[in-house]
Image (spheres, helix red, strand yellow):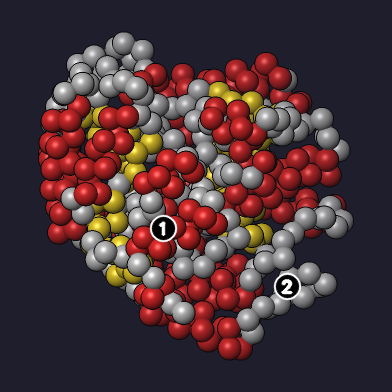
Amino acid sequence: MTYQNYSLKQLQQIDAAHHLHPFSDHKELREAGSRIITRANGPFIYDSEGAELLDGMAGLWCVNIGYGRDELAEAAYAQMKELPYYNSFFKCSTPTPVLLSKKLAEIAPKNVNQVFYGSSGSEANDTALRLVRHYWVIEGKPEKNRIISRKMAYHGSTIAATSLGGMDAMHKQLNGAVPNIVHVMMPYAYELALPGESDHDFGLRAAKSVEDAILEAGADKVAAFIGEPVMGAGGVKIPPASYWPEVQRICRKYDVLLMLDEVITGYGRTGEWFAAQTFGIEPDTITTAKALTSGYQPLSALLVGDRIASTLVDKGGEFNHGYTYSGHPVACAVALKNLEIIEQEGLVERVRNDTGPYFAKALQERIAGHDLVGEVRSIGLMGAIEIVKDKATKERFLPSGSAAVTVRDHAIANGMMLRATGDTMILSPPLIWTRDTIDMACERIGKALDLAQVDLRKR
């Protein structure tokens, strides 16, 4: 029996009876009923009632080549027919993770040549944490185990990944985080810059918070700094140009490893294969997932720099870590085909030279002037719209976050899937978006802002 045999109400009832959703108020969700997405094609998704929505979030930051790509289905089918599964334990491997590792080393920063596979970004960050701490043990410095992260960072939802992240609501529910992880200020100039402070000076001040945390603990106690090149789930917070070069200088000065979380920014999002290349960063680890397969299969890849990898291979002995699905042959086959499509269709170059700049211009010219918008910002094909009550003072609507939800709901009702994070609307569309798609998005966002303004001014 297929889902077509069920009505929307029946599906919602079954969903409410048995399905616990991620990041949801389950009582509220079950009272309202889930929207059931049934199919998708290109940049659009469709629900069970036939409504078409322009997907402004690429699923969940991941569907970079868009929906309905037969090539990926065919790659999965062919691999399933030949070898649906075998593990990477017992001194064994299969062809697709071998070839994918070679490809990832070719497109990654030059100092990054090794890959460890999992199934999600959370798993990749768990692995990165274990690997970095293990590295310092191998090097005879077990006391060097503190990790510096940032407030409002998102690194996943497992216990270790939640601990690495800097979201208070998640920490409260964790009720006991992984020890020796501290969080410093985020590079969020819109709210944290001082009056009259330039972007350049703010970037240096935000970077200095990393140095202050190193000095407070003692450099001999600090293993690594972890950061998203652009803070994604925290609200697409784009650091000033001065920030990352200074963070890298600080890490090198105190012999602190640099861990990048590119689960969102990897594979073309910023106009390069990796945001490390966009910002000129030479990391020791890069966590990736999501767009590695464009979401068609669950797969993560932790890219490991030469410094860590050489120590692990030469001195480490057995690394007692891994997953049943590390290097899953079907997922890796899909990833290989996905990267091939990104390359063949020139999507990275298109984001860098065409759609990324057009997206930035369209947001500035058509959205930034709206009365509800305090700021728009973007890099490549990811952007943010700050929702405010007063543009001059940056005053927000109360309760916090409610205004962005109002905008989001009007956007969805008018055919535009957006996400609200706090008081910020965020976008991360498929890389197949064209100028026409961007125009469509701005038109629908503008309409949502107008309708939301009417509602919000009634408060």
Q: Quadrant of residue 431?
A: bottom left
* Residue drawn at the location 82% of the way across and 30% of the way down: 143
Q: Amino acid at mark 1?
A: Gln
Q: Quadrant of residue 230?
A: top left
Question: In the image, which is nearer the foreground, mark 1 or mark 2?
Answer: 1
Label at residue 87: 2
Frontmost residue, 442 versus 112: 442
Q: Is residue 173 above or below residue 197?
A: below
Secondary structure under the numbered disc 2 in the rendered image: loop
Which is nearer the N-term, disc 1 or disc 2?
1
Q: Quadrant of residue 397?
A: top left
* Residue drawn at the location 67% of the way across and 66% of the way down: 325
Q: Is residue 369 above or below residue 340?
A: above
Q: Where's the C terminus, which quadrant?
A: top left
Report x, y in % for residue 401: 35, 29
Mark 1 Cα shell of 10 Å, populated few (<14), some (14-19), many (≥20): many
Residue matched to label 1: 12
Q: Is residue 78 left or right of residue 123?
A: left
Report x, y in % for residue 266: 46, 53
Mark 2 Cα shell of 10 Å, populated few (<14), some (14-19), many (≥20): some
Q: Amino acid at mark 2?
A: Asn
Q: Is residue 191 left or right of residue 439?
A: right
Say if residue 312 shows up in the picture.
yes
